[in-house]
Amino acid sequence: MPAQYFIVPRRTPNWPDLADGFRRDGRYTESDFIPAVLPPGFPDNLAARIDLWNDTLKVDFFACRARLAQIAESSWAQVVGAKMLRGEVAVQQAVQANGGARMRFLFVDDDDWFAPDLPQRLESEIGSRAAILRWAAPLFNGSWQARIQPGFAPRWCVKTYLYARSRPLLESVYRRVVTWLPQDPRCPLVPGDHLLYTNNYVVTERYLDCFNDLGCVADHSDASKLAMVSRLRLQSRPRLMLSAANKHPCSAGVIGRAGSGHGAAQRLRTNVEDYVRRGRRCAVPAALAWTKPLVDQTLDVFEAAL
């Protein structure tokens, strides 16, 4: 019986409703989309950053996020043979309905992309004992980068970088070593501080032999921590590029870079202009050719906002 692939988007705000409400009323309610406990990487003054975005650019923050979510979902819809599951209830029902059948769960943020042939390329790589398999973790932020994902001693590699990161000299040495590794110059390697990233891992039914709850691996930070401390069998295929993270200018981790105070609006505009300019000039790596229409559509969103 062939394996069944499930795409599981993480819980996100209803961006179209927020965009419609903001367009109609000119205001928004923070509790509708800003969690009480901010995840790692979120700026503490996210609402102020969103206000700055809305006051500075032609397309409001919520409309941008709604369009980016639409682009991402179009990439998921093209994944051959995969079914979409939304919410914990749907996931549990799928687990119960499939019993002991081979199941593959792909978790994803609402702005990130999957390759259309992911199941076909991945299935032959999954070992019979693998609970989690991860592949390369490329990201697009106006240009391409790939977080280092070694197939050997991956836990040791992450621990070493986490140790070096708080020590400037050691971090400098670590980064220099990374540049010496074989790599595609159009998608240079950068250090990685997680075992797993937003959508570069698949959870198999073997995981369910050890844990009953997929909630432990739905968020990539939680999944990475679990993989670091547990004996779950982790496979690595660092040469496969089956997904991409979209680090656009209004992602939570990027929007705060304009800072605050005098000149913040101009810094924000300059950041978006630079993103679009670099993105238009950037050649898509051959292994990521499937992302080209997604990149173009994403750049269109921010070009329209300028």
Image: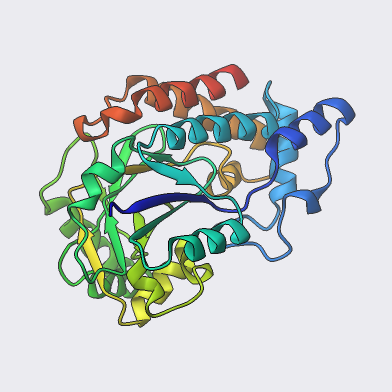
**Quadrant assignment for the N terminus:** bottom left
Q: Nearer the viewer, residue 99 or 200?
A: 99
* Residue 249 picture location, percent across and down: 54, 36
Hey, which quadrant is residue 120 in on the image?
top left
Residue found at the very far right of the displayed protein: 25
Left or right: 247, with 101 as reference point? right
* Residue 221 picture location, percent across and down: 47, 65
Q: Please give the name of the residue rendered at 76% of the width and 35% of the height, measured from the top-left corner.
A: 17
Colouring of the image: rainbow
Q: Nearer the viewer, residue 241 or 143?
A: 241
Q: Please give the name of the residue rendered at 17% of the width and 37% of the height, measured from the top-left corner.
A: 185
Hey, which quadrant is residue 20 in on the image?
top right
Q: Please give the name of the residue rendered at 81% of the width and 32% of the height, measured from the top-left corner.
A: 22
The total of numbered circles placed on residues is 0
Left or right: 257, with 160 as reference point? right
Is residue 262 visible to the viewer in this orientation of the structure?
A: no
Hey, which quadrant is residue 255 in on the image?
top right
The vertical placement of 169 against 186, above or below, is below
The vertical placement of 221 against 272, above or below, is below
**Quadrant assignment for the C terminus:** top right
Is residue 97 visible to the viewer in this orientation of the structure?
A: yes
Q: Nearer the viewer, residue 58 or 261?
A: 58
* Residue 23 picture location, percent across and down: 81, 26
Q: Please give the name of the residue rendered at 28% of the width and 51% of the height, measured from the top-left corner.
A: 2
Left or right: 216, with 281 as reference point? right
* Residue 55 picture location, percent across and down: 75, 29
